[in-house]
Image (cartoon, rainbow, N blue to C red):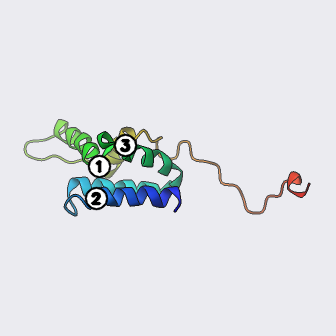
Amino acid sequence: MDMQEKAITMLEAQQAKVKPHSPQWMVGEQLKDLLRAEPHLAELVEQDLEGKEMSLAECEKKIKAHADRHKTGNFACVTPLEAEEIIREFYGLPAAGADRPEPVPDNVFHLEDFF
């Protein structure tokens, strides 16, 4: 099992402990989407998920606090982009597109490969 699969499995295990479509479950879904788009983040997420203080429930509390601070009357909302920024900050992940490894083209040959 690679790092990405392991991190997603760990997220799904935490999600199994909460009600489907609950705020905590949705944090897991958004984090899984991040890992699918940026698999190089899996190792960081996996390390964080091992600690109780870095659970989906704890991350969701940060998102809820943000919503509460921006509440208008009885209405509070967090956009997907805001939630992603909070999730990235909580788990110590780089900003979207930052720190992404450069893809290596398939058709590049290095002379040292032949020696």
First of labels 2, 1 by sequence position = 2
Q: Which residue is mark 1?
A: 56
Q: CA distance from mark 3 to mark 2?
A: 20 Å
Residue 61 at x, y percent in the picture: 22, 42
- What's the amino acid at mark 3? Glu
Q: CA distance from mark 2 to mark 1?
A: 8 Å
Q: Residue furthest top?
A: 69
Residue in the image at 22% along x and 64% along y: 20
First of labels 3, 2 by sequence position = 2
Q: Is residue 72 in view from this perspective?
A: yes
Judged from the image, the secondary structure of the residue bearing numbered disc 3 is: helix
Q: Residues within 10 Å of mark 1 (few under 14, many from 20)?
A: many
Q: Quadrant of the C terminus?
A: bottom right
Q: Which residue is mark 2?
A: 15
Disc number for residue 85: 3
First of labels 1, 3 by sequence position = 1
With respect to residue 81, does 105 lie above or below?
below
Residue 110 at x, y percent in the picture: 84, 54
Residue 33 occupies quadrant: bottom left
Residue 91 occupies quadrant: top left
Q: Residues within 10 Å of mark 3 (few under 14, many from 20)?
A: some
Residue in the image at 32% along x and 55% along y: 28
With respect to residue 44, does 103 lie above or below?
below
Relative to 7, 14 lies left or right: left
Q: Residues within 10 Å of mark 2 (few under 14, many from 20)?
A: many
Residue 19 at x, y percent in the picture: 19, 61
Is mark 2 in CB contact (under 8 Å) with mark 1?
yes
Q: CA distance from mark 1 to mark 3?
A: 15 Å
- What's the amino acid at mark 1? Leu
Residue in the image at 40% along x and 60% along y: 9
